[in-house]
Image: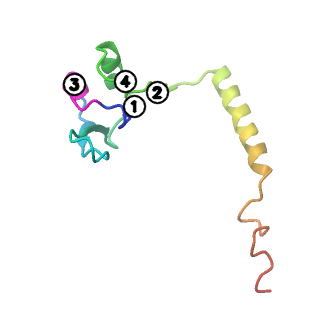
Amino acid sequence: VDEDTCTGDHACIRLSGCPSLTVKPNPDKLRKDPVTTVMSSCVGCGLCGEVSDAAVLCPSFYKADIVQNPGIHDRALDRIRRMGIGILQGARPNPGDGAGINAGAGQ
């Protein structure tokens, strides 16, 4: 839930009935209405976002795609992405390899 766009009417909580949706104080001191937040007990079913989107309630819910059983295409794409990230991370010095600022200090 995006706190900046949450309207504070809590219709998403009433309609979805999800026990993981709750309210918390608004971090914006100029707004008095509490905002909706998702607790750590959320299992990621996406029902709250679907209800909010279908009822045109609140733009603060975003769609999260959860891949339960990835196919060969999803696994290959994940492998390529991980290799690309590994290559990009390899271009930077690793903090644990001794090539940092204090390399050789105290010897």
Start-end of magenta stretch: 7-17
The location of residue 84, given as percent across then percent down, is 75, 37
Q: Earlier in the sequence, mark 3 or mark 1?
A: 3
Q: Earlier in the sequence, mark 1 or mark 4?
A: 1
Residue that carries the numbered disc 2 in the rendered image: 64
Q: In the displayed structure, would residue 93 be above or below residue 102?
A: above
| Label ID, residue 44 | 1
Please identify the quadrant where the C terminus is shown.
bottom right
Q: CA distance from mark 1 to mark 2?
A: 8 Å
The mark lying in front, picked from 1 and 2, is 2
Residue located at (33% from left, 23% from top): 47
Contact flag, marks 3 and 4 (Cβ < 8 Å): no
Residue that carries the numbered disc 4 in the rendered image: 59
Disc 3 residue crowd, few under 14, some 14–19, many 20+, Cα 10 Å = some
Please state which amino acid type lies under the numbered disc 2: Ala
Q: In the displayed structure, would residue 92 be above or below residue 76?
A: below
In the structure shown, which secondary structural element does the residue marked by tag 4 occupy? loop
Disc 4 residue crowd, few under 14, some 14–19, many 20+, Cα 10 Å = some
Please state which amino acid type lies under the numbered disc 4: Pro
Report how many numbered discs are placed on residues in the image: 4
The location of residue 65, given as percent across then percent down, is 49, 25
Q: Earlier in the sequence, mark 2 or mark 3?
A: 3
In the structure shown, which secondary structural element does the residue marked by tag 2 occupy? loop
Please state which amino acid type lies under the numbered disc 3: Ala
Applied colour scheme = rainbow
Residue located at (75% from left, 71% from top): 101
Residue that carries the numbered disc 3 in the rendered image: 11
Please identify the quadrant where the N terminus is shown.
top left
